Image: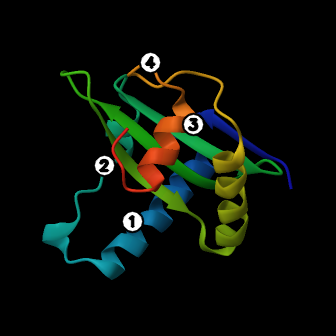
Amino acid sequence: MVFSIARESPRRDDVVALIRQSDALMRSLYPAESNHLVDIESLAQPQAHLLVVRGEGRALGCGAFVLGGDGQAEMKRVFWEGTHWQRMRALMDSVAATPAQSEAPNGRDASDARDASASGVAP
């Protein structure tokens, strides 16, 4: 299966369905006071960047970066549809094995930062 990852609107029907699946899972795992779910309208704001992973045109997973005013970003809504967990793992393994094409913010090669991070050593 070929995967694509692109920024998309959270208002697309299949993306809404994916977010609803995420909501149901989070509500089954955590009490209401521990759930701080970003809603669809918040994900549609300019400071939110929702990325959707598709396979054969179908939305399989998503994740969002919500930018803060201080230049920081927070990851939200990272979710994979349950039946595609193994495919997601294969995709993540292939991404991790791909050499970086850019530099990390500190000027080092991004793969160095990723390798150091994975080993528990700060880059």
- Quick one: quadrant of the C terminus? top left
- Can you say whether 121 is above or below 111 in the image? below
Which of the two marks, 2 or 3, is nearer to us in this view? 3
The residue drawn where x is 69% and y is 36% is: 99
Q: Secondary structure at mark 2?
A: loop
The residue identified by callout 2 is 38
The residue identified by callout 4 is 107
The residue identified by callout 3 is 111
Of mark 1 and mark 4, the one earlier in the sequence is 1
Tell me which amino acid carries mark 2.
Val
Of mark 1 and mark 3, the one earlier in the sequence is 1
113 sits to left or right of 45:
right
Q: Secondary structure at mark 1?
A: helix
**Rendering colour mode:** rainbow
Residue 9 visible: no
91 sits to left or right of 80:
right
- Can you say whether 98 is above or below 45 in the image? below
- Can you say whether 122 is above or below 66 in the image? below
Q: Secondary structure at mark 3?
A: helix
- In the foreground, 41 or 114: 114
- In the foreground, 102 or 53: 102
Tell me which amino acid carries mark 3.
Ser
Tell me which amino acid carries mark 4.
Gly
